[in-house]
Amino acid sequence: MAAMTMVVPRSPVARTREFFRLYWHRGAPGRPAVPWVLNLAYGMWLTAFAFKLLGSSWDMSWHFKFIRDDFAPPHLINTVGTGIVIVLVAIHSYTGLGCDRRSLRLMRVGLALFLLAAPLDVINHRVNGLDLTAWSPTHMLLYLGTGVMQAGVIDGWLKQAEPGRLRTGVLLALWAFFLENTFFPNGQQEYGILGLRAWERGTPEAEPSLLDFAARQIGHPVDRAAVLHFTMPIADWVYPLWGIGVSALILVMARRTIGHAWTATAIAAAYVAYRMLIWPLLLAATFPVSAIPFYLLAVGLAVDLGHRLGRPLLGGALAAVAGYGALWLQSRLRPWILGDAHTESAPPAAYWTVVVAGVGIAVAWWVVSRVSARRT
């Protein structure tokens, strides 16, 4: 009881010391946690995901300029986030604080998948060489592990935190991290299209050693075919289906989870704002930059409007049409800030997939609505 009425330590270091002094006891998942302990734990989760976000953002740009290095600075930044995650999962597992059985299980499974994928990815690069594409099996396993882990954190915070602004704000941040992790493979095309156009202009972004290595992998000289294989190896139908279809589903789940009117728009805007923030930083540091998915704002708005209408099937169609329409419009606009009328502002996309995306979003939205209503 004394612990419940104690003065909350002010600094993170003091809070950490106080936590280990008072609460470092073995317990089953679901053990009640006082608010400051809960906030300390999930504040560290946000810190871990922030390190992983910064590392992965720089990592994509790095690999479009240099040959891969296991100890490249972006990998080290990402490793800091992974280290924090390992500590957090160990603390949750030992004390049982800040989670229940399901959320802890998701955290553990996600971490296990990530730790399994990391050495497999290193082996894959050793065997297959460059393997830049963000869509490789080992890379997808990394995203899957991170996503499962993030789902566990969202589940834990949703159940443990008291209703209020803090609970809503943390949920918004966690869903934004979830969206970024899932959307991340599309960076292959967003960086790739600008890398290809830079080579065509005679100002390649990649170092000569990287271009030579990539060309040797397919037995080519450093010509357009080799650079195209290096920068844009993914079919055009993948980009819009993943960027609009899957992103819309994530925004639907976030809107259902949080329940506020402009949830999907706020999460999409936060992600786009982050991409806009790192763009000039990478450019100033002479690293490759990417096209920015501004069309996600239209997807977020459509999801929020669909929820207001209360019709999942109509909402799915609206999200697909709005997303594809915004992507088409963005592709017609040239990035004047680059001073080059021949540089695309969006990767190539197969627009016929709008039908597939619309049906997929509508069905998934309907399923989410039914499951949510049944639980309620």
Image (cartoon, grey):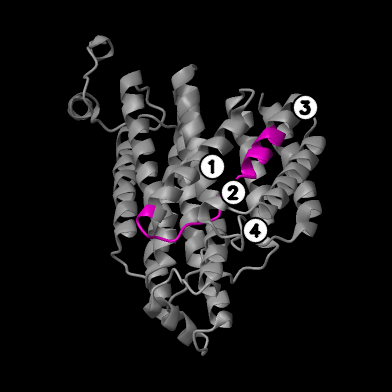
Mark 1 vs 2: CB contact within 8 A: yes
What is the C-alpha distance between the residues marked 3 and 4? Answer: 28 Å
| Residue under numbered circle 3 | 310
At horizontal 51% and vertical 63% (from top left) the residue drawn is 134
Q: Which one is nearer the viewer's eye here, 304 or 15?
A: 304
Q: Amino acid at mark 2?
A: Pro
| Residue under numbered circle 4 | 239
Label 1 secondary element = helix
Q: Amino acid at mark 4?
A: Tyr
User: Which is nearer the N-term, disc 1 or disc 2?
Assistant: 1
At horizontal 67% and vertical 62% (from top left) the residue drawn is 348
Label 2 secondary element = loop
Label 3 secondary element = loop
Mark 3 vs 2: CB contact within 8 A: no
User: Which is nearer the N-term, disc 3 or disc 1?
Assistant: 1
CA neighbours of label 3 inside 10 A, class few (<14), some (14 to 19), many (20+) = few
In the rendering, which numbered label is found on residue 198? none
| Residue under numbered circle 2 | 293
Classify residue 123 as left or right of residue 301: left
Residue 293 magenta:
yes
Question: From which residue to which does the magenta span run?
Answer: 284-303
Percent x, y for residue 323? 71, 45
CA neighbours of label 2 inside 10 A, class few (<14), some (14 to 19), many (20+) = many
